[in-house]
Image (tube, grey):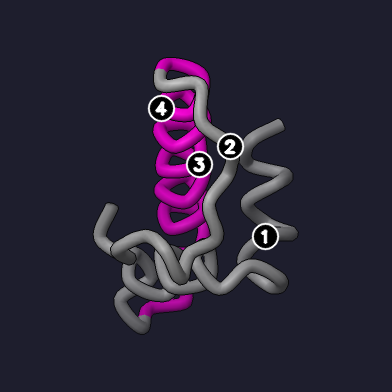
């Protein structure tokens, strides 16, 4: 499910798009690797939200490297 969200999110979410583009490194052959990287980052953020009991914060409040 996270990978499906990552495929959609890279088009509509600036944070996911930035993570995707950084992992893509300009090579179309790395699309699947980049999507898995986005899904992993999303999972990390969701886990942190559950752990800390905090709501989703837009990318403007977060560092892109996080």
The mark nearer the N terminus, 4 or 1, is 1
**Residue that label 4 marks:** 48
What numbered label is drawn on residue 55?
2
Pointer 4 with pointer 1, Cβ within 8 A: no
Which residues fall within the magenta stretch?
27-51
Residue at 69% from the left image edge and 73% from the top image edge: 11
**Residue that label 1 marks:** 9
- The CA span between labels 1 and 2 is 18 Å
Residue at 58% from the left image edge and 44% from the top image edge: 56
User: Secondary structure under badge 4?
Assistant: helix
**Height in image: 66 above or below 3?**
below
Residue at 62% from the left image edge and 51% from the top image edge: 6
Pointer 4 with pointer 2, Cβ within 8 A: no
- The CA span between labels 4 and 1 is 19 Å
The mark nearer the N terminus, 1 or 2, is 1
Which of labels 4 and 3 is toward the front? 4
Which of labels 4 and 1 is toward the front? 4
The reply to whether the magenta stretch includes residue 65 is no
Task: Give the dominant element type of the magenta stretch: helix, strand or loop.
Answer: helix
- The CA span between labels 2 and 3 is 14 Å
Pointer 3 with pointer 1, Cβ within 8 A: yes
User: Secondary structure under badge 3?
Assistant: helix
- The CA span between labels 4 and 2 is 10 Å
Residue at 72% from the left image edge and 44% from the top image edge: 4
- Res. 65 image quadrant: bottom left
Is residue 26 left or right of 29 when viewed as pictured?
left
User: Secondary structure under badge 2?
Assistant: loop
Is residue 31 left or right of 26 when viewed as pictured?
right
**Residue that label 3 marks:** 42
- Res. 55 image quadrant: top right
């Amino acid at each position: 499910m996270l990978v499906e969200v990552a495929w959609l999110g890279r088009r509509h979410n600036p944070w996911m798009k930035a993570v995707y583009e950084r992992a893509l490194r300009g090579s179309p052959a790395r699309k699947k690797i980049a999507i898995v990287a986005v899904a992993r980052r999303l999972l990390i953020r969701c886990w942190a939200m559950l752990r800390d009991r905090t709501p989703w914060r837009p990318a403007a409040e977060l560092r892109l490297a996080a």
